[in-house]
Amino acid sequence: MTYPYSRQPEWGDGMRTIPCVHNFLWIFKMTNTPDYNSANGAGVAFLKSLLCSAAFVGAALFIATDARSEDADMGAYDDVALEEVVVTGKPVAYANNATDNVMLEQKAPSASVLSLIDNLPGIFIAEGGTFGSDDWSTTISIRGFNVGLQEQQIGMTIDGLPNGNSNYGGGSKANRYTDSENIARVDVSQGTSDISSPSHEALGGTINFVTNNPNDEAGATAAVSLGNNNAQRYFFRYDTGEILENTHAYISYSRTDNDAWIGNAGFANRDHIAAKFVTELEEWTLTGRFSWDNAHEDNFQRISLGQFEENPHWDRLTDTLTGIPYVDQAFRESWSTLRTNYFIYLRASYGGDKLTADITPYFHIQKGRGDWAPQYVALIADGSSTKPSGVRDLHTGAGTVYGGSLAGGYSFVDAAGTPLAPTDGCTARLTFPYGGGGAGDNPACYEAGANPASSYRHTHYNKQRLGLTANAEYEFAESNTLKAGLWWERADRDESRDWHKIIDPRTSHKFEEAAYWRQYDRNFVTSTFMLYAEDTIRLDDLTVRGGVRKYFVDIDRKDNFGIQNDFSKNSNSDILFSAGALYNVTEDLEVFAGFAQNFAAIKDGVVEGSAGTANSTSNAAALAAIEAIKPETADNFDVGFRYSNDWLRANLTGYYIKFNNRITSIATGDSVGGIDYGGEVESIYLNVGGVKSVGAEASLSADVSDNWNIFSSVTVNDSEYTDSTGSIVKGNKVALASEFMMVGTLSYHNDKGVRAGVSAKHVGKRWGDLSNTDRLPSYTLVDLWAGYTLEMNGMTNIDLGLNVNNLADKRYLGGGTPGGYFIGTGRQVMATIKVGF
């Protein structure tokens, strides 16, 4: 959719006894020696290392078939009882946190699973739609890194498997893969991500959504929820019990409907099916999961700070059709996101005395569309009426024009459908939206009898991913463990855009099935291969680790019209290092320090934006600039402590991050390099410096009695740009990066089935734009929840729940893009009755 608004440590001999790690370290040493000139030497060594680690994983799985252990670990991603998950995180040498049961209770069952982590330190979640029902307006931020409409800088996985990027155009966030009832926990690695995490956009860490396993006993759960804005949700899950020997499974279905919370138009609906099985053998665990998600979401619009101050209750989309195309381009029901996602995986996990290993093939299909209603019918220059051989038949017909360029448009026709021009000298002008249009947009500038004409524009996103992860961990000695693995994926994405005539703009936005213009049709194939190895050494109370990781990413772009040249871009990483140390000061207190070089591959959107007009014959300078782009990287440093005893859990982390090689679109003639790319190239993507972030995160959870718990988290963050280019000024604060956040939660449970809680989150002032002229106001949101579980004969239980989010109905600005912000969701109340039997 086009938005019309602006539409480390020294490595000893012990490490060298491990051949795979030794090869990695040799490459790093040699490629960082000034007089080293042999690329072939490094390539051969890395190939050896690749084969070595791949062989290690394969051999581990082969050896596992003969190995025996009476106390087998049943897989790295098995369910963990929520009562045992605490927000102090796992005992590892980097900052991490996990949701607990109270955080799951705080949100309504219909809430997006993204919202479950909002109380964790360092995390900012903003969702513009009711219960997260609008992917377009969703923003996630960690330590100055963002996931939103313009940036994808945080890795996201489901059961340790990649989500396929989080961008709007062809990506899928975690809420497309699971319901909140099927979540066991969410693990967040802020900054220094887990070395094995399969993501190539994890500059700011990773978020892993872990789904729960089938129950041991057969049973069913049915739930009905009702809430504001005609919100309705139905959920059903059936657990089979032991359906086959040592095999348990479940299947679930949910249906969610709600209207837009702003105005009187717009809606969202979502259907979701999930199924999972777990088979436990003596040494092996087999796990399979399938999910299907189908969503239609009408969107919300970004507004300026001035517009928010003028009216904080309205995002400038309209509720009714006026029959004036220029005004009706802002009709909410024509701003839509449609997505269908299928995701399936099968994991084989082995747990032995010395060895654990897993291998997981997966497959993902996404089909989707983004809608908008331009205020005119396009006039096309240099198009073709012959359908190119590489174009699918989707929404095309005998009158479809393929390719060409926009040569103007018309908004009114006579009774015969002939385009009309406005009356000469007409000075009447509209003022809404976007400051108003010209004479051709105003019906007052046409003779009586003129009829409106406009378009309905579809941007189609289709994607298929086939991939595999493999990991193995072997304990060579009581004090030495090697972990190695790989990730391979092939993603095939189609993107096309077509324009349809709206049948009668005076009555509805319904459109003709066959498009009158297929504007573009392109294919992107992204091949990813990641290999890693990590060694961990334990010396009494001290644990140290060191690892290396390498990405190979290739993007191939093809114009299905056959007009533009094919284009390829290599996005390989350097060898990425990570290291850390963990020291147990006492039985309850541990201190840690970690370092990691994180990596984000060049996205196909960069190739799309740059190679869209560049080709090898007429824009050699532009192609050379694209070839020179380097992937983005971030050097992350963490240091902190964790404390945990039988009633108190606390942590404190300080961090420093240097974000390098930030990729930004630069207009032709900009001062950067003084390059004029010529031709039709209006902008180019370049590496233009980076961002520096310094901050601290803290959390505390205390069981003050058998029934009461208090939780608090605090985040202090300072993120600034390190280079000047275009509208970005060195030293300015990063747009939309949270500077101060604080959470306080009080919750109650008793053994009679009563639960209740209140939680408040304060978000301090932030700079909203690149020039640091918009200072977004601070806000505090309060959530309230209560519930009662009644156990009955013949039924497992009856549970009554009430969730109130944004209790005070606070109006605030949430996420967005620099200079354009989404209004945060108003008060949402939902009551739920759940029956188990």
Image (tube, grey):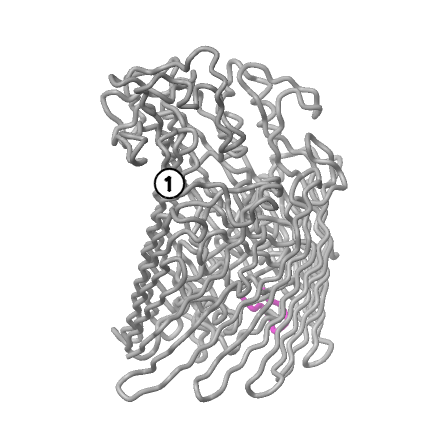
Magenta segment, principal secondary structure? strand
Residue at position x 41%, y 42% from top?
332
Residue position for label 1: 320
Amino acid type assigned to the residue bearing label 1 in the image: Thr
Residue at position x 62%, y 49% from top?
145
Q: Position of residue 667 (x, y in %)?
A: 62, 25
Which residues make up the magenta segment? 474-481
Q: Is residue 114 left or right of residue 545?
A: left
Report how many numbered discs are placed on residues in the image.
Answer: 1
Residue 81 appearing in the image: yes
Residue 64 appearing in the image: no
Query: In the picture, which quadrant includes the C terminus?
Result: bottom left
Snapshot quadrant of residue 661: top right
Snapshot quadrant of residue 390: top left
Q: Is residue 645 left or right of residue 67?
A: right
Q: Is residue 425 magenta?
A: no
Residue at position x 30%, y 69% from top?
237
Q: Residue furthest left?
A: 398
Mark 1 residue element: loop
Using the image as rendered, state which of residue 117 and residue 20 is in the foreground: 117
**Mark 1 crowd level (few <14, some 14–19, many ≥20, 10 Å Cα):** some
